Image: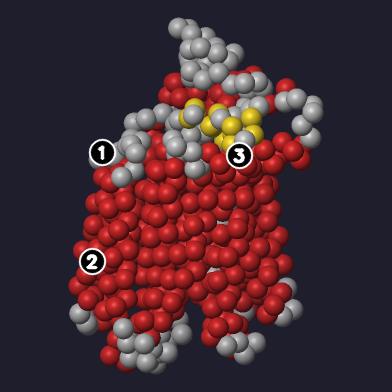
Amino acid sequence: MMGDRESDGYTVDEALSSVGFGTFQGLALVFAGIGWFADAMEITLLSFIGPALESEWSLSPTEESLLSTAVFGGMIVGSYFLGFIADAYGRRMGIRGVAMITFAAGLLSAFSPDYKSLVVLRFIVGFGAAGGHVYSAWFLEFIPTSNRGAWILVMSFSWIIGELLEASLAWIIMPRWGWRWLLALSSVPSLAVLFMSSFAPETPRYLFIKGRTNEAVRVLEKIALINRKELPTGNLVSDYQTSQPEDETPLLLSSKTRGVEKWLGSLSQLFSSDLLCTTLLSWILFFAYTFAYYGIQLMISALSSDQSDCRSLSIFPKNAEKGSLYVNVFITCLAELPALLLAMLLVERLGRKRCMEILTLLTVVFILPLLSHQNATVTTALLVSGRMFLSAAFTTLSLYAKEVYPTSVRSSGFGLALVYPTSVRASGYGLATAVGRIGGMICPLVAVGLVRGCHQTLAVVVFGIIILISGICVVFFPFETKGRGLTDVVSN
């Protein structure tokens, strides 16, 4: 039943609080975690296939770097598009799209006959992997308010596990069977997600906001049954009155017209007076965090490489074993775990905004000593520590961005009188991550170019300023989401 809040009714948040975090949420965590796990493997393998292809196909440094650029380019396009699909047609549909694209393109990459076809396929892989945020958006909408922050951060462990497994898999596979086998095996988790998505339910919050109340109730009843809990008595209600159920949209609107309206409405509402500040601040932070996160990793790689023009800056001996690349990536990824644990402790105690402020400040503190040359051990420790805290801040930002955007916005956009609410949670987050990917594309110019050109101090200054600006931006976010229910609607 839709309408004004009734005394004997309950909301989606109240229903989820009643059933608690139980067996169902545990299964949902595993499913969404495997999705993130799969995307992490596809991104991490970029660290390993470049050198192998350079030798096998005689690639120039520019051609080798283009492989990574192609993936980030695909992610820029896919971040918003796949978020829009999840908002317009359902979280489960978005998940299926992500898994299908990532698996198909990832597997076909292993059979690439030449360099050009591999670049195109890796672009498509990036397009699919960019939708990883759809998994967390789906999982987020099943979690009770009191547990939400900590459990989303727990889910982030799956990304780190994916990175660690890919480094281990590359260490085993690459010397024996080569890069094609690594690409093929790395696509298997996406296939598993595609299979399991058939059993994953749509989120009750999405169903309810779309007017499919009976379906939302059935999902909540299934969750209560699996968790062995009882739903509150009464009807599922909301303070928000939708215009009409989704299946009653006027027949005069063709499916194509409805899709265009949904897309235009979703995009325009991100720049409405209610969400403009949130959107712009999210863009700045995602750009800054992505730029600095991948930039610091590239600095570590550049300082570990024997290609640097400055032997005094190298942190590994020139004749280091080939296995040191796998060890380096493995240790760097493993170092993210302590910071993630710190974020889990802070996010529900201090709130999302203060947690980001503290972690961003710690990143700056560990980066600043690199303004002067340090020995190899200290340089490595400072870079890994900086990346560690920045990773935790990035994860907290991802949580906040999913919470701060509403499920739906009821308004007219670009002069269109929308006959149904327009979802913006996944698409708003997706567009912000797309802007962030631009930072990932240009950061090599600073991290690799400056370090190999003997300008480590200048590189640190650039990263320090960008990280500091991001910390200032956190202060201006509109409100703290700690302890708040997910917002269903913003009305203009």
Note whether residue 38 is visible.
no
Residue sitting at x 60%, y 39%: 414
Name the residue beneath numbered marker 2.
366
Image point (62%, 35%), residue name: 415
Q: Residues within 10 Å of mark 2 (few under 14, many from 20)?
A: some
Q: Is residue 80 visible?
A: yes
Distance between the alpha carbons at the discs numbered 3 and 2: 46 Å
Count of marks, rendered view: 3
Q: Residue at x 63, y 68 (%)?
A: 122
* In the rendered image, the vertical position of residue 387 relative to residue 327, given as above or below: above
State how the image is colored: secondary structure
Provide the residue designation for mark 1: 349
User: Contact (CB < 8 A) between labels 3 and 2?
Assistant: no
Give the mark nearer the N terminus: 3 vs 1. 1
Q: Given this view, does label 3 or label 2 mark the residue nearer the observer?
A: 3
Q: Nearer the viewer, residue 279 or 288?
A: 279
Looking at the rendered structure, the secondary structure element under dot 3 is: loop
Name the amino acid, label 1: Arg
Q: Which residue is mark 3?
A: 414
Instruction: Give me the C-alpha separation between circle 3 and circle 1.
Output: 41 Å
Residue 275's x, y, as percent? 45, 39
